[in-house]
Amino acid sequence: MPIIDFREIPQANTGNGDQDTFELFARDFLEAMGFIIIQQPFRGADGKKDLIVDELRIGNEGKTVIRWLVSAKHNAHSSKARAVNDADEPDILDRVVSNHCHGFMGIYSTLPSTTLHNKLEKYKSSGKIEVTTYDRERLENAIISNLDAQRESLFLRYFSVSYQKYKELKGGDRMPFEEQASPCIISDEQVFQACKDAIIVLEIEKLKFKYSKLEWKDGEEVLNEFHQFAEHSNHRISYEVLLFLSYLADKTRGGMPSETASSIYWLVLTFYVHPTNEVEKERANELAQLCIRIAFSLIYDASIYSNNMEIAAYGYNILKFVYSKSFEIGSSKLREGVLKQFEEIERIFHQREHQDLTLAIELLNVFRDDLGSKSLALPPFSGKLYELIIDKPR
């Protein structure tokens, strides 16, 4: 009997801002599985690409990078949970080749049909491209069979009802990934810190639930309540807050006001943990990746769907913040990640030839030229951008 109910993820054909949730789940799932996200999912004339990821394989001959074109199809809400058929996946080989990928990956909340399965097997046996699919059973198994902290967070975030049922099924507090630890001595300070973290995480969950019931205009007061945890912040607390902000940023196109984007921006700066040793540097890098995700969602949605340059500016300033922190962490990889994000956003803008994104491209270039600045003050704007961001009626 299935444990995860994929119907907890909203349908893909709604217009309420949740229609991309399954694509976002696919992204977060693959990230949890160790894939490297090269292209984020985005809606529109995207050449039938949901996202592109890299897989690093290590063998006797060294390291090999496999680039996958990923297609996410969410049919769990359809009549009898309709299988994904070959008509749903046209031109697979052309799509893979034209996007310079090595393989095709299907992420499906139901199953591939027999015709699609045979079609994929034909491509696979020909040796032209690699092929793999994650259907509902394989997705569930991948999440639950190795339920580490990242996959548990994924489970809870997208399938909260199924998660609670799973916890009850497994006896409440004990989780399958917990190892039988040998007896050890834990200091009073460690016990106190663990208890305090647990209480704060519980309070954060209450705020998240409270916020989910409100309209944009009524949510500011709840967002401000997150600041009460700032003085107790550590990696665990920061990760929970930033994960929630990532969820909010994904809904920017649903009518987010500039005031909410401002609150997200200040919370990002507040809850990023400044590292003091090598262990904390690795954790800070993990938080920085979440910050990049938040920034991308703000920039993309505000530029493409809301035409709100002020919200986009908050996103770019988060990227500038991460860029400056990359020097503090000593991570050239993180620095390159920010630069690649600028390149990816620019590429998306130029792809949308039917849409006038002149101002969006101008704003991107202003912030890219300002990356070297150590100040988080907004860069100087001219003309229309000044009117839309600085001189905007409040």
Image (cartoon, rainbow, N blue to C red):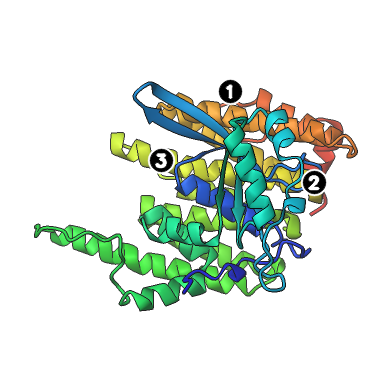
**Picture layout, residue 76 above or below residue 358:** below
Find the distance from the CA under tag 3 to the CA under tag 1: 20 Å
**Picture layout, residue 209 above or below residue 334:** below
Tag 3 residue? 284
Based on the displayed image, in which of its 4 quarters is residue 248 positioned? Answer: bottom right
Label 3 secondary element: helix
How far from the left and from the top, in percent, is residue 385? 81, 36
Q: Residues within 10 Å of mark 1 (few under 14, many from 20)?
A: few
| Nearest the eye: 273 or 51 | 51
Dots 1, 2 in contact, CB < 8 A: no
**Disc 3 or disc 2, which is closer to the eye?**
2
- Identified by mark 2, the residue type is Gly
Label 2 secondary element: loop
Q: Earlier in the sequence, mark 1 or mark 2?
A: 2
Quadrant for the C terminus in the image: bottom right
Dots 3, 2 in contact, CB < 8 A: no
Q: Earlier in the sequence, mark 3 or mark 1?
A: 3
Tag 1 residue? 372
What label sits on residue 296 in the rendered view? none
Based on the displayed image, in which of its 4 quarters is residue 92 positioned? Answer: top right
- Identified by mark 1, the residue type is Gly
How far from the left and from the top, in percent, is residue 147? 37, 58
Dots 3, 1 in contact, CB < 8 A: no
Q: Residue at x 46, y 50 (%)?
A: 271
- Identified by mark 3, the residue type is Ala
**Disc 3 or disc 1, which is closer to the eye?**
3
Tag 2 residue? 44
How far from the left and from the top, in percent, is residue 240? 45, 57
Q: Earlier in the sequence, mark 3 or mark 2?
A: 2
How far from the left and from the top, in percent, is residue 78? 71, 70
